[in-house]
Image (tube, helix red, strand yellow):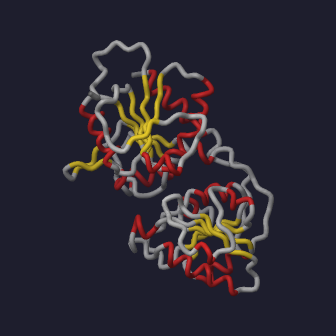
Amino acid sequence: MLVSRTKERCTIKSILFIICQHGAFNYFQPLWKKWKKDKVNFDWYVLIEKKTLKISRNDKIKFNVIDSFSDTQKAPDLIVSSTTGSEIENSFFKKAKNNSIKIIQLIDSSYNYKKRLFLTNGEKKYPDKLILLDEKSLTYAENKDKIKKNISIPIGHPGWEGVKLLKEKKLNDILFISQPISDDYKKELGYTQQEVINDLLKLKNEKFINSINISYHPREKENNKNLFDRVFKDNEGLNKCGTIVGMFSSLMVNAYYSGRNVISFQPSLKNNLDFLSQRGLINVVTTLEDLKKNIFDGCIVRPEKNPFNGSRERLDRFLQDQINFL
């Protein structure tokens, strides 16, 4: 049974990661690589949802695959979890709270903080600590979403650390970064990814456009791929295209710190969820005409410094402090 270890005298403590989201996998993977190399003085292991493992690969780290909650796990001293609202996460969260096991959760986006926390009987249940991306995320979470104060820690994003400037490419080679908006939000945001695609493909008739390419989200079906010049996987399209168009994908952050011309295209926008434009780093456009202008006339910034450098070290220190002081 997953029971409290408070009465046990354990010489080696342990951390259990519960990963039910591709984004959380990308966030923690740099830390796992470091711990595997450094041989830390505590045990750590990862339980990863089966569908997440299918799109998240690392040949050097062994993952235990889970389809549902199991209370046969030996109780860890600390649980670190993604926040998708899945039954698996919620089950581990409840067991941890019931058995005095400390739990830390990650929100790796700049929106929907309150929606992603555990809900039971209409009441929000807070983790002991909540990892956020930066100080602006902290301010938004506490002031707008009214998240409980003094539990949130702005760490950064280890997956965005070390992104290097790429060689400049032609601005008229466009990469569209798609997302399953219709699955996650329906029409709540004022648009779907298909509406964005329909508008974007109208640019193929423009003489100044050389190519329009696409990178699908891991959870998306590759619909309409024959309408694009090329389909790229993961980050490979960033090396080939000078202009990156998306809605609010985290891959846009990689593109920005790689020095690409990044544009958030959100037609009929109701609620801007884009990390970069929230911080005034890129433009949000809502019409095809404005998109055209921004392809060549937008302010292209090639950042001299990546503010997420040092994120892995901060995350490492934070989690080691948490486990060592239990």
Residue 170: image quadrant is: bottom right
Q: Is residue 315 above or below residue 211?
A: above
Residue 285: image quadrant is: bottom right
Q: Is residue 176 above or below residue 86?
A: below
Q: Residue at x 38, y 14 (%)?
A: 10
The answer to whether 294 appears left or right of 91 in the picture is right
Expressed as whole percent of the image width and height from the top left, the position of residue 283 reads: 61, 69
The answer to whether 272 appears left or right of 123 in the picture is right
Q: Residue at x 51, y 65 (%)?
A: 179
- Residue furthest left in the image: 121
Q: Quadrant of the N terminus?
A: top left
Q: Residue at x 40, y 67 (%)?
A: 185
Expressed as whole percent of the image width and height from the top left, the position of residue 154 reads: 50, 43
Q: Is residue 196 above or below residue 318?
A: below
Q: How many numbered discs, if any? A: 0
Is residue 86 visible in this depiction of the protein? yes
Q: Residue at x 62, y 75 (%)?
A: 226
Q: Depth check: 141 or 259 in front? A: 259
Residue 206: image quadrant is: bottom right
Q: Is residue 128 above or below residue 239?
A: above
Expressed as whole percent of the image width and height from the top left, the position of residue 183 reads: 41, 66
The answer to whether 194 appears left or right of 203 in the picture is left
Is residue 130 visible in this depiction of the protein? no
Expressed as whole percent of the image width and height from the top left, the position of residue 256 reads: 66, 59
Q: Quadrant of the C terminus?
A: top left
